[in-house]
Amino acid sequence: MRRLLIDDNIRGFAIRYQSQMETAYPNVISDIECLKDNLVKYNSWKDSNGIKDYFNEIISDYPALLALEPNDWDIQKYMDLEKKNPGFLKRTVKYGEVKKTHKDLTDSVYKRILFCLRYSEARLILGPIHREMGLKTCVYCNTQNAESAENEVFYEMDHLMAQSDYPFLGTCFYNLQPCDGGCNKRKQTKPCDFQLYVNNSVTDLSPFKLKAYFQNIGPVTSMCDKILFLGKNGITTSESEAYDRTFHITKKYESHRDEAAIICKKACTLNQSGIDAYEASIGYRPSREQYIDYIIGIPFDESLIHGAPLRKLKYDILSDLDNSGVIKI
Ligand SMILES: [Zn+2]
């Protein structure tokens, strides 16, 4: 829901990921070489040199590909090479044989590339790095945890550029976006241009807004009628509509109206008597920041929304209540 501008801090994480991958898996290039040779040897191609060229590009671009920034992705180069054998990445091919039985080993080309690039293992290296970066929720919906532990990653990593079309980016740090199974499944069949990492500071980092509608705004009851998913100015945009169509965000937030009501209720208790009572209970007059922390449990800083589920909702509600003068501090 919120993009990250690539700065030196993020670059540091990407470089660390690249170096951990290189140290842990030094045979990636020789495996890609071997796959190239076997594909040419065991299968017939319209243009076998085109196959070799495609793999030679991966070999020459690796390991830089692991931390290659979106601005530097040379998508066209690979698409042009693919045209020499149209659709070959999704073709089921023979990539080797079991020596004892001469049984054929078959799979899709792109899946073998992902295998050689060690995609499954890359996930395990990336999990703790995402955690350290504060990426702990699905970046598409902000309702689900993206949890990881040592040697286990419990969330999915969506390939912004689909792995079946652009397998050379299959383990690129900037192409892997933490998400939950539901969002990943929905995105697969529909277009989505939400790119988590962006080079361009002109790109709107926060293009969306969750707008909660309340009945009886006040400290006693604050029923939330509905939560809409809109563009950042509070109106539907073509981008927000397309995003909602893909990820069903409005529907997803139907079940989070109670949480929204709690935020509203807490914020409304901050009238003068509420402030006095709070001050009396802790012995000093808290700052505005401390009150806000009391209401939403985090500082009023949207860059922190990926740290826990529903932070985007909390942030947007507080922002609305603040702008409409409900918060009296
Ligand atoms: Zn999600």
Image (tube, rainbow, N blue to C red):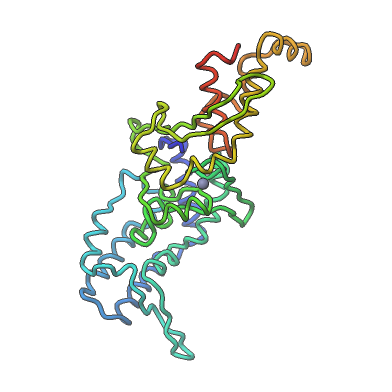
Judge left or right: residue 109 versus residue 266: left
In the figure, 141 relative to 92: above or below? above
Task: Return the residue nearer the eye: 51 or 279.
Answer: 279
* Quarter holding residue 131: top right
User: Do we see residue 64 in this rendering?
Assistant: no
119 or 223: nearer the viewer:
223
Q: Can residue 147 be seen in this view?
A: yes
Q: Is residue 69 above or below residue 56?
A: above
Q: Position of residue 169 (x, y in %)?
A: 37, 55
Instruction: Note whether 187 is above or below 279 in the view shown.
Output: below
| Quadrant the C terminus occupies | top right
Between 241 and 126, the one lying in front of the other is: 241
**Residue 140, percent from left and from top:** 47, 43
Q: From the viewer's perspective, is 108 left or right of 211?
A: left
- Residue at 41% x, 67% y is 111
Q: Position of residue 16 (x, y in %)?
A: 49, 47
State the residue at coordinates (74%, 12%): 279
> Splitting the image into 4 quarters, where does residue 203 fall?
top left
